[in-house]
Amino acid sequence: MRTKAASSSHFDRTEECGMKKNILVLVGSPRPKGNSQVLAEAFAAAAREKGHETEVLRVSGMKIAGCQACERCWKKDGLPCVQQDDMQKLYPKLNVADMIVFAAPIYYFGFPAQLKAVIDRFYPLCHGDDKRRAFADKESALILCGASEEEDDFEPAVANYEVMADYLGWEDRGILVASGLGDIGDAAKSEWLEAARDLAMDL
């Protein structure tokens, strides 16, 4: 299964500048100790070794409802979203993050509902050109896993991520697609653990 990373020229520029990032890792698995959580923690540990400030959040453990399409988020100044749930705790973290990493299993060829709800609630941060520019100066990465060995099964979720990152103006720093991980604990004894670390070490 493939991995994709950004160009080496960007790595060199980052290394020369000694840039330390604020990285937010959003884990979409409903399993507290699932394979995507394990891969996310491996990524985060390596990122911290590189000196980056890194936080891992399991969004399925938070109470975050889907977008209600009320449009009030950008009609009322200073209020990101009228829904008073745990997304209110997440908005400040999203705003200050230099990099946002999504880690999730594929469910029916896409992101789990818990993570999709978070992504849909990005709307207050990026609706309209002015807001989107304010939310654009970020990097991102994707860590996907699943039981399937077929690369095509992961493509819809990868495409979703790529279109989203392009729309938001984010710089993609890499995509890791970890196949053959069906049971809890599979990631910890697989080659994908090191691949997740490598993704972070290349930042």
Image (cartoon, rainbow, N blue to C red):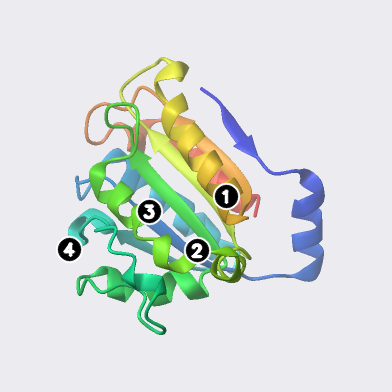
The residue singled out by tag 3 in the image is 119
Q: For the residue labelled by badge 1, is the local secondary structure a helix, a strand or a loop?
A: helix
Instruction: Work out how far the residue at label 3 is from the one at label 2, CA to CA, in angstroms.
Output: 11 Å
Say which residue label 4 marks. Answer: 63
Classify 10 Å Cα crowding around label 2: few (below 14), some (14-19), many (20 and above): some
- Report the front residue among 165 and 76: 76
Q: Looking at the picture, which amino acid does disc 3 mark? A: Ile
Which residue shows up at 75% across the image and 53% down it? 11
Task: Give the mark count.
Answer: 4
CB of mark 2 within 8 Å of CB of mark 1?
Answer: yes
Going from N to C along the chain, the mark reached first, 3 or 2, is 3
Q: Are marks 4 and 2 in contact (CB under 8 Å)?
A: no
User: Is residue 39 in view?
Assistant: no
Q: Position of residue 171 (x, y in %)?
A: 65, 52
Q: Where is residue 13 in the image (x, y as percent from the top left)?
A: 81, 59
**Residue type highlighted by circle 4:** Lys
Disc 2 and disc 1: Cα gap in Å?
A: 9 Å
Viewer-nearest of labels 4 and 2? Answer: 2
Q: In this picture, is 11 found above or below 125?
A: above
Which residue is the site of mark 2?
126
Q: Mark 3 or mark 1: name the one nearer the start of the chain.
A: 3
- Relative placement, left or right, of 190 versus 184 is right
- In the rendered image, which residue does mark 1 sit on? 167
